[in-house]
Amino acid sequence: MKELTMATAVVVLLLAGSALAADEAPSRDGPLAALAPFIDGEWHFDGKWANGEPLKAREVFEWGLGKKFVTTRTWVINNNGDEYERYRSTFAVKDGKPVMYNFAYDGESSVDEVKVTGKVIDVRRSAKTPAGEMVIRQEIELTEKDKFRWRVWLDRDGESQQIIEGEWVRKAVGKEGEK
């Protein structure tokens, strides 16, 4: 009986240690530390593409496994108010550097280069189009606790064309996903 109690105590201690490790905050200076301020709440965008078309979207950032990853889900809201999930991404560390594994609604996927310079997170994705190869370059910059600036360019043939610039705003989310 004493052996069983000792074994139970060891299991309880191991489980408690695992639970505490899972709740630990990520390193403040690690490769994914720049993403920590985006966690919690739901981000909303209401802006326009460079061609004048409106874009409404919402996005959620969450910690992934053991707070070693950051996952994002992005929904686009159509003009009629319907929405669909357009992207699901996971930020991770590969070879000591941040990368983003990106999955799109149409089945496309990519592994994107991520650089952090100060408060700016720069994400670059190479893409092939009928017009040739290009790089989609995005910058996100936390400008206030609950706001970040989003800018996107298409770089092709030595030319850079900005296609959007706007501000995402965080809104609190109630229990069980209530907005």
Image: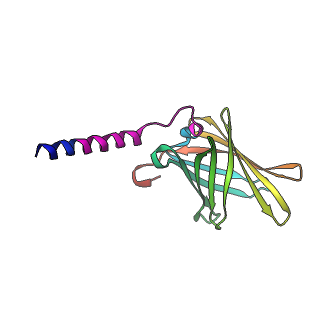
In the image, residue 63 lies at what x, y percent? 49, 46
Viewer-closest of 156 and 39: 156
Name the residue located 51 percent from the left edge and 44 percent from the top edge: 68
Q: Which residues are magenta?
A: 10-34
Snapshot quadrant of residue 37: top right
Given residues 18 and 77, the one toward you in this image is 18
Camera-side residue: 112 or 130?
112
Which residue does the image show at 83% across and 67% down from the upper left? 130
Reply yes or no: does residue 12 show up in magenta. yes
Instruction: Give coordinates of residue 90: x percent, y percent.
Output: 57, 52
Q: Which quadrant would residue 103 be assigned to in this image?
A: bottom right
Q: Residue furthest left?
A: 1
Taking the view exactly as shown, the residue that stands out farthest to the front is 3
Residue 71 relative to residue 102: left or right: left
x, y percentage for residue 33?
56, 37
Residue under the image location 62 percent in, 45 percent down: 168
Using residue 10 as the reference point, say whether residue 61 is left or right of it: right
Question: What's the colour scheme?
Answer: rainbow
Residue 53 part of the magenta-drawn span: no
Numbered marks: total: 0
Q: Mostly what secondary structure, the magenta segment? A: helix
| Residue 158 in the image, given as x and y percentages of width and height | 89, 49
Q: Vertically, is 157 above or below 107? A: above
Q: Up-down: is 54 above or below 9?
A: below
